[in-house]
Amino acid sequence: MNRDIPQYSNIGYTGTGYLVIRASAASSAIPLEGAVVTVRGNQPNFSSVIVKLTTERNGLTPKISLATPPRGNSTSPGIENPFATYNVDVQLDGFFPTSAQQVPIFDGITSIQPINLIPLPKNGYTDRFAPYDEKVTDSEPPNL
């Protein structure tokens, strides 16, 4: 964990939790290699990029360590924030970018966050629209 990031010292987290992202397509049936994963803090004073990773052949990122409140906060009733939350953005060419907001991370626990990416239509656009220099005819099936 990189506690050299200035915001880490401002949030008062003393614990360490872990995060692995699993990027896939087709309802988690196809692991996606090469997806770029960006992890950010999820607080107004702690929202900068913490780490950028790339998924491996199995669709998983390496395990990263992240600052969390101490484990005792999650075992005591009435504690408002027993875990830390982080935002995760995932991008891969040919797929819509996807985000997971407020991913919970507990002290001493490895969280695995699944991200299911949706392929872009064959024409690379988000709808049937084609630029002025491309022709779309009604005889063609839609490029979805």
Image (tube, rainbow, N blue to C red):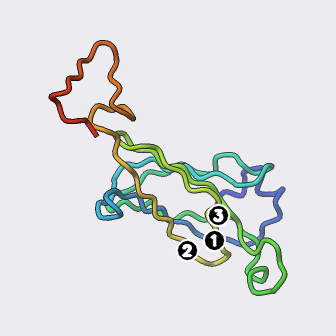
Q: Earlier in the sequence, mark 2 or mark 1?
A: 1
Q: Residues within 10 Å of mark 2 (few under 14, many from 20)?
A: some
User: Considering depth in this image, is 13 or 106 the residue closer to the camera?
Assistant: 106
Q: Amino acid at mark 1?
A: Gly
Q: Secondary structure at mark 1?
A: strand
Q: Mark 3 = which residue?
A: 66
Q: Amino acid at mark 3?
A: Leu
* Rendered location of residue 57, percent (x, y): 31, 58
Q: Are marks 3 and 1 in contact (CB under 8 Å)?
A: yes
Q: State which quarter of the image contains the N terminus.
A: bottom right
Q: Which mark is residue 110?
A: 2
* Rendered location of residue 18, percent (x, y): 58, 69
User: Considering depth in this image, is 83 or 121 the residue closer to the camera?
Assistant: 121
Q: Are marks 2 and 1 in contact (CB under 8 Å)?
A: yes
Q: Amino acid at mark 2?
A: Thr
Specify the farthest residue to the front.
138
Specify the farthest residue to the left.
139
Q: Are marks 3 and 2 in contact (CB under 8 Å)?
A: no
* Rendered location of residue 35, percent (x, y): 41, 49
Q: Mark 1 = which residue?
A: 17
Residue at the spot 35% in from the left edge and 62% down from the top edge:
27
Q: Residues within 10 Å of mark 3 (few under 14, many from 20)?
A: many
Q: Earlier in the sequence, mark 3 or mark 1?
A: 1
Q: Secondary structure at mark 2?
A: strand
* Rendered location of residue 144, percent (x, y): 28, 40
The CA distance from mark 3 to mark 2 is 10 Å
Residue at the spot 57% in from the left edge and 54% down from the top edge:
88
Q: Earlier in the sequence, mark 3 or mark 2?
A: 3
Q: Image check: 100 left or right of 24? A: right
Q: Secondary structure at mark 3?
A: strand
User: Considering depth in this image, is 110 or 65 the residue closer to the camera?
Assistant: 110
